[in-house]
Amino acid sequence: MAKNYVENLLGENERILLGTRQHSFVLFGNIALEILLIILLALGVTAAIPFYPVAVAGYFLILVPLVGMIRDILIWSNREYIVTNRRVIQISGVFDKNVVDSSLEKVNDVKMSQSFLGRMFDYGDIEILTASELGINLFRRIGEPVKFKTAMLNAKEELGYGEMGARPQAEEDVPSLIAKLDGLRKQGIISEAEFQKKKAELLAKI
């Protein structure tokens, strides 16, 4: 991770719990052809050394897949998926950075998909369903998907949110809850003793 850049994104008391990238298989798949071309061109240049102009042209040709490989490596290494104690951050871009946040309090569900090979080599897809405008975030073939999902759920639990993104009753607006209870008391739905007991419990949680 580009720690300095990521740390600049963090808020006060926010900390990184887990960071990952797409699996190295993704990188290898992107650069395999370029590596093959570099090898073939290098062999051709070696064979063409006695023919100096051809060898020079071969060296220049090698630069094409070499530059492409470096580009793919930079793109892969700068695409990061990070779980903090408050949100999920997706970062991409080598020079121009693109940052997408998903606040844990707006995360409604997390789906993970792993193929047989994914379980063997520890990669998979993570789909995050949120209540924000983004709707769905899909992280494809990331490394350590189980740890990533677990870190998200644990962080969400520490914030006091349930599975569907709602805070438990203890975190709701206590005065509003007391007013609702008072309305129930006036309607005769609950007794005065029940009202006073529940009111004391709510006030104790402030």
Image: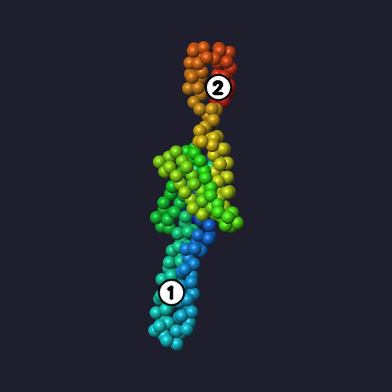
Left or right: 60, with 198 as reference point: left
Number of residues whose C-alpha sits closer than 10 Å to that of mark 1, classed few (under 14), some (14–19) or many (20 or more)? some
Element type where label 2 sits in the image: helix
Question: Is the residue 23 above or below the residue 44 in the image?
Answer: above
In the rendered image, residue 179, in percent from the top left (x then y), is placed at: 48, 18
Q: Is residue 15 visible?
A: no
Of mark 2 and mark 1, the one earlier in the sequence is 1
In front here: 203 or 126? 126
Q: Nearer the viewer, mark 2 or mark 1?
A: 1
In front here: 5 or 29? 29
* Mark 1, residue position: 62
Count of numbered circles in the view: 2
Element type where label 1 sits in the image: helix
Distance Cα–Cα, label 2 vs label 1:
73 Å
In the rendered image, residue 39, in percent from the top left (x then y), is placed at: 49, 74
Number of residues whose C-alpha sits closer than 10 Å to that of mark 2, classed few (under 14), some (14–19) or many (20 or more)? few
Residue furthest front in the image = 116
Which residue is at a point 55% across and 46% down the rendered structure image?
A: 149
Q: Is residue 44 visible?
A: yes
What sort of colour scheme is used for the picture?
Answer: rainbow
Q: Amino acid at mark 1?
A: Ile
Q: Amino acid at mark 2?
A: Leu
Which residue is at a point 48% across and 22% down the rendered structure image?
A: 176
In the rendered image, residue 63, in percent from the top left (x then y), is placed at: 42, 72
Which residue is at a point 53% across and 60% down the rendered structure image?
A: 24
For the C terminus, give its image quadrant. Answer: top right
* Mark 2, residue position: 203
Question: Is the residue 160 above or below the residue 73 in the image?
Answer: above
In the rendered image, residue 94, in percent from the top left (x then y), is placed at: 43, 58
